[in-house]
């Protein structure tokens, strides 16, 4: 069964996908294509879901490699595939290795897929606000460069994430970003409640890509919080008191 995903031409035709929550076998609050290896879903269901996603990229299940994501600026370099129980604690991964898919999972955070097809270097990053603020995007570009990529050739695509109309933050959050750089004010809009603002996480990540020298970049227009039927959303589940939820996968491979 082919599971649906979103793609973008700027990634030069490399196998990739920003998968939705549709097309899997998980049930309940994890329905249905939950690809998180760290949640409370049935491990056999997760394995089947990840196998389906890998197949959509033209690969076997063992070719899909993931991370133990910790909201850090740390980047792992993949030389040889590691098992699910040996995932490094990091929030991005880069490789020159063909035949493997780099996968990260999100449920409101920003997934970013990277490629320098000419150099044969790819990357995938999980950018929550903490990781983005700490420099995960810039660190991923630098790690790709160390493998032979060139910043001017790297393409970067921001996938489905929580978008500004859905992302309310408090004044302390706002102040932290302004203290780091007054220019960050452009990523905040007036909040719907006193003492709050609306944060543009995807815009902040796009600016980080630009600052890192990634000229070929794009953003997939989708809001994980607002599009209930298409995406898992941690914030939506929290507000609804829904308990544990699934995470959608974003992945890229060198063919």
Image (cartoon, rainbow, N blue to C red):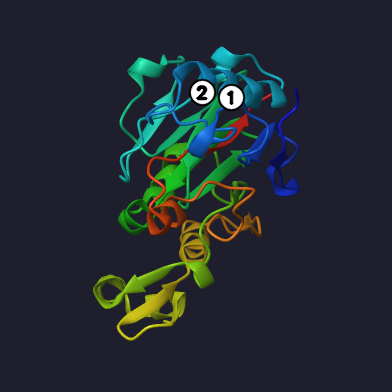
Taking the image as shown, residue 72 lies to the left or right of residue 251, namely left
> Eyeballing the image, is 5 above or below 56?
below
Taking the image as shown, residue 46 lies to the left or right of residue 91, namely right
Screen quadrant of the C terminus: top right
**Residue at 38% across / 31% down in the picture?**
39
Viewer-side residue, 136 vs 5? 5
Viewer-side residue, 79 vs 206? 206
Viewer-side residue, 75 vs 239? 239
**Residue at 57% across / 24% down in the picture?**
50
Q: Position of residue 145 (x, y in %)?
A: 48, 40
Question: Tag 2: Cα neighbours inside 10 Å, few (<14), some, or many (≥20)?
Answer: many
Q: Position of residue 52 (x, y in %)?
A: 65, 22
Which of the 4 quarters of the picture holds residue 142?
top left
> Eyeballing the image, is 23 above or below 44?
below
Q: Which mark is residue 214?
A: none
> Eyeballing the image, is 63 above or below 249?
above
**Residue at 69% across / 43% down in the picture?**
11
| Circles 1, 2 touching at the beta carbon (< 8 Å) | yes
Residue identified by numbered label 1: 49
For label 2, the SS is: helix
The answer to whether residue 148 is seen in the rendering is no
Residue identified by numbered label 2: 46
């Amino acid at each position: 069964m082919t599971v649906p995903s979103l793609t973008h031409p700027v990634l030069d035709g490399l196998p990739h996908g920003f998968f939705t929550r549709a097309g899997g076998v998980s049930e309940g609050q994890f329905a249905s294509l939950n690809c998180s290896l760290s949640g409370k879903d049935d491990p056999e269901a997760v394995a089947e879901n990840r196998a389906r996603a890998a197949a959509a990229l033209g690969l076997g299940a063992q070719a899909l490699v993931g991370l133990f994501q910790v909201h850090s600026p740390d980047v792992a370099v993949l030389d040889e595939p590691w098992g699910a129980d040996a995932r490094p604690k990091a929030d991005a991964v880069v490789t020159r290795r063909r035949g493997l898919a780099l996968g990260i999972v999100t449920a409101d955070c920003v997934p970013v897929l990277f490629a320098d097809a000419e150099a044969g270097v790819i990357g995938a990053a999980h950018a929550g606000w903490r990781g983005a603020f700490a420099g995960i995007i810039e660190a991923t570009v630098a790690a790709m460069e160390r493998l032979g990529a060139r910043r001017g050739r790297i393409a970067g695509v921001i996938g489905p994430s929580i978008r500004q109309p859905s992302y309310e933050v408090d004044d302390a959050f706002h102040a932290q970003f302004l203290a780091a750089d007054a220019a960050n004010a452009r990523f905040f809009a007036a909040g719907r409640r006193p003492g709050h603002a609306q944060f543009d996480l995807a815009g902040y990540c796009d600016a980080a890509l630009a600052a890192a020298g990634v000229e070929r970049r794009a953003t997939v227009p989708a809001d994980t919080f607002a599009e209930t039927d298409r995406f898992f959303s941690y914030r939506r589940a929290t507000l609804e008191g829904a308990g544990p939820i699934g995470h959608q996968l974003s992945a890229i491979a060198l063919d």
